[in-house]
Amino acid sequence: MSGYEEQEYTKNIDVRMWIKIIKMMSRYRREMILLTISMILLSLTDTMYPRMNKYAIDTFIAEGDFNGFPVFVAIYMLLIASSTFFIYYFIRLSGKLESFVVYLMRQIGFNRLQELSFSYYDKTPVGWIMARMTSDAQRIGDIISWGLQDLIYGFAFMIFILINMFTINVKLSLIIVAVFPVLVVVSFYFQKIILKNHRAVRKFNSKITGAYNEGINGARTTKALTREELNFGEFKELSGGMRKASIRAAVISSIYTPIVIALGSVSVGLILWFGGVEYQNALISFGTFSVFIAYAIQIYEPVQQIAGVFSEFQSAQAAAERTIQLIETEPDIVDKEEIIAVYGDSVNPKPENWPPINGEIEFKHVDFNYKTGEKVLEDFNLHVKAGERIALVGETGAGKSTIVNLICRFYEPTGGQILIDGVDYRERSQIWLRSNLGYVLQTPHLFSGTVAENIRYAKMDATDEEVREAAKTVRAYDFIMNLGNGFDTEVGEGGNRLSTGQRQLVSFARAIIANPRIFVLDEATSSVDTETERMIQQAVDIVLSGRTSFIVAHRLSTIRSCDRILLIHDGKIMEAGNHKQLIKLRGAYYNLYTNQFMQEAENRILNERF
Amino acid sequence: MTPSLIIRFTVDSVLDNQPVQAPGFVIRFIESMGGTTVLSRNIWICSITVVTAQALNGVFAFIRGKCTATGSANIARHLKDTLYDHLQHMPYNYHVKAQTGDLIQRCTSDVETVRRFLDGQMVEMFRTIFIVTFSMIIMSNINGFLTLMSLLLIPFIFLFSFFYFKKIRAAFTLVDEKEGELQAALQENLSGVRVVRAFGRERYEVDKFENKSSQFRDLNLKLIGHMAKFWGLSDGLCFVQVGIVLMLGIYLVTKGELSLGSLIVFYTYVSMFVFPLRQLARVLSDMGRMGVSMGRIYEIINTPAETDTPGAQAYPLAGDIVFNNVSFGYDKDKPVLNKLSFTIKQGETIAILGGTGSGKSTIMHLLLRLYDYTDGSITINGHELRDVEKNHLRSHVGMVLQEPFLYSKTIEENLLMARHDATHDDIVTATRTAAVHEVIEEFESRYDTLVGEKGVTLSGGQKQRVAIARTLLRDSDVLIFDDSLSAVDTETDAKIRFALKQRRKGVTTFIISQRITTLMQADRIFVIENGSLADSGTHDELLSREGLYKRVWNIQNMLEDEFESEVTA
């Protein structure tokens, strides 16, 4: 539900952070400068219209002098043409700036996400990251392009009007300027309130979305508990709250606009009065009089605009802060520079410099605790020969997954060393280790795309023949050929068009296609039907033979086939040996697995087809 | 619009001493005040009038804003309430198949589209039409020719806007779709982050994302290109229209056919209505969208909800349960239950054993009438289930689902959902029975601990136990545990069953499980195979004959043998 929640906003404008963002945008300097220039020119054009009218009234009407009329028409048309052009041009530029800024933020963010360690993903919900990369990035793009443009236009327009006014008539200008401060204060005050109310509406909106989510997902429970009426009552409170908030927001907006218009009409009224008297006394021309009436109305627009942009900036700031926070998070696991120089990194690997791997692994006095402070391993020692098959068993939370994650270098030991072929793995690059690593997850994750694309994921340059061979090796070939389009069948999002068993087999094929020396398997606990179970079992046997392998095991048959079984309890090896030795011991392993075995056997009998 | 007329009056009659052009009562009023000469000496009166008129205008604008906002907010709320209520009363089956994301979108963004149309666009539409009509009337009273000229480009502007907005809408849909793809790509990368890392495919992922992201960017650029052309050209056209009026107006003024004030009126009015007219075209091109949203909303509302059989009553339900020749299938041609018959005495505990898909859960769904049985009869306490009010039935037959749903509220609130007037003692009694009281007490905020993403994530077993406690809070005549102890370890399972036994008197209980130890102490055990009752009896009775139950039970012994042989081999 938290994915729907509206975040809180900060109060003041943090200039330093905006400078950071502007710096990031430095490659679009040209666009920004062009945008500024075109906005200034556009505002200049826009302020010219009243002046043109003044000229027309004073020259053509008052004096009846039509000599300049063709020129006047030409200039007028030119003005319209330049308005048209600048409007077109600034929208293009702003749009370009917006699109590229959003694109850039997402690129930077995505690259960073590929580097960040699992400790980051452990504590950051996917929904949070999604929001930063989508709506927040968009927000920054919008404010940098359209917000900036509004700001430039607003200021330039105001300045040009002031210049025009003061060059025509100082006294009348001062009258208009007198009402000005009131307007500025009112505008900023209202924009702030309007924004606040909009947030309140959005907050209700996200709550309502959450309520729908819960109402729909929990509908079956609701029925069993006959909670329909009470739930509806709670929902009505929310929808009523939203109703109230949105009316409130609308009412405040509809107070603000009339107030601005009324304030504008005060200026107009004053100009009418003072200007009228001056005109009667022939102190000013009628053209001057009319141009001031026009300016008195026009000058109110940019103030509203600027006030709006400022409050937008305030709300976009929170978005920017969170995105910057994501971008600036430092990954925990990084290769040393001298190692990257030799081995390359994930973006530019240099496989020609990689030493071959044998597959001997040693944990030497390894300590590990998660960032939260939770201690998982302490002085953990283990030596695994190349090609040995190790089963890790034990209760949830005993530390099995941690050991496996340490081998994959998803986490690094907080104390001690992990040696691969006798060398601390931190002395070699992550990409080197991972390219020699086969990895199958408890719940296999496939990417949307075809079966072949998924298998090829571990070896991008694999030929069709290799893909087929890999599938044959894990006995996935037959079922794949039975899918609609064989290897070109789309697997759907997360592989959801395949059954769990099929997904597992594809992920096995994926794991072995690159022929890794080290294999890590986190076995699934969920039960699949007997036939699939048998197929997976066979696949596991084939896949693991001849490789150093670690299995977080749940099925007896898998465990039995391992060279060494480690019963992990509280981050320590409690019992170790092969299946027979451990059964003889009649200890924790025996107890754990008599229970497990019973369940498996019961399920098997119950789900047999007669 | 009046302020412009007052300005015109001031300019023409007060300052220029031309005859007053106004309805009779206005002229009489002005003359009774002393005529234009008085005003020309006191122009401030005109100023005050302008300000007052504008202020009045503001008041009306405010009233209009408030009314439309209230109206549209009320309608939106009504729609949301109706949708929520309706969704809750949809049959069980609907929710089994429901696509949450799609439903939520209909209930929120589609309702929002409708609201926005009612709030902004519709009112704006009427306002524009109103302004145009009134401007026309006033303008044509002043000068017919110039009025006609004011409308010269309007059809072009209107058609241009209408068609361009259709184009923009199409481009917008493309951008929207791409954005969806981009989000899906991101989501997939984030949820598959382990796989990406394990295979060192960061580079590939970056390229893939870059590809989508740049496609989105380019489509967005294209959309903005359309918009730039539209706004640029249509603004240009609008300015030209205003320019035409100005030029012709100047000409007419110099020829003496138009007063200066009237020119200002024309100029102001034309500027005032050309831009909204362009907007009007946009609203019209948007109408289709709102129709689509309405359609999507009504698709939900028009799906029939659950109803009671006419004449259904709230009969007392403490009594025997009788199934007589009950048949049922989720699909017509695939029967799940086949002429099932049995009788259960009030207060009996019945355990049900069966494989996946054997139909054991279906029996319970029928008992709660989450699905309707088609053949045969089911009676409780002698009353046919069909004739019992559904709400009454469900509040007296408590069922704990296999995958219970906890609301993102505190534990206590979740428990109170079953019976909102329960005291804390009632709650603790229930949680003790469900062997979850100690677990809850260990949480930092105990019963006030938030459940779900924002709070504590409960394990499957803990969730099941909270759900059991929740159901126990209610005084049910029948209790159903639909495999709801599956994630609880054997020891706790035994504890819960013992506590249940202590507590229930006269409560008929069903326990469904695949775990034989959970079942063996029941009064009777039903073995369900292929939708029929294959066998029933007590533990000892079932062990005395060959069958599924005995085979499952024998595993215990088989296990010992197998290990012995392995160790000695």
Image (tube, rainbow, N blue to C red):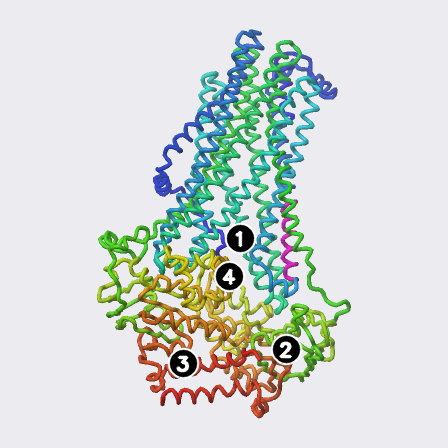
The residue at 69%/13% (across/down) is: B19
Q: Between residues B498 and B432, which one lies in front from this camera angle?
A: B498
User: Which residue matches tag 1?
Assistant: A206
Is A135 situated above or below B453? above
| CA distance for labels 3 and 2 | 34 Å
Q: Amino acid under label 2? A: Gly
Q: Amino acid under label 1? A: Ser
Tell me the crowding category of disc 2: few under 14, some 14 to 19, or many 20 or more residues within 10 angstroms, Cα based: many
Is B157 situated above or below A103? above
User: Mark 4 falls within which chain?
Assistant: A
Residue at disc 3, secondary structure: helix
Is B72 part of what is drawn in magenta?
yes
| CA distance for labels 4 and 1 | 28 Å
Residue B262, how many percent across, how many down?
A: 64, 17
Marks 2 and 1: same chain? no
Residue B5, how many percent across, how many down?
A: 65, 22
Boundaries of the magenta span? B69-89
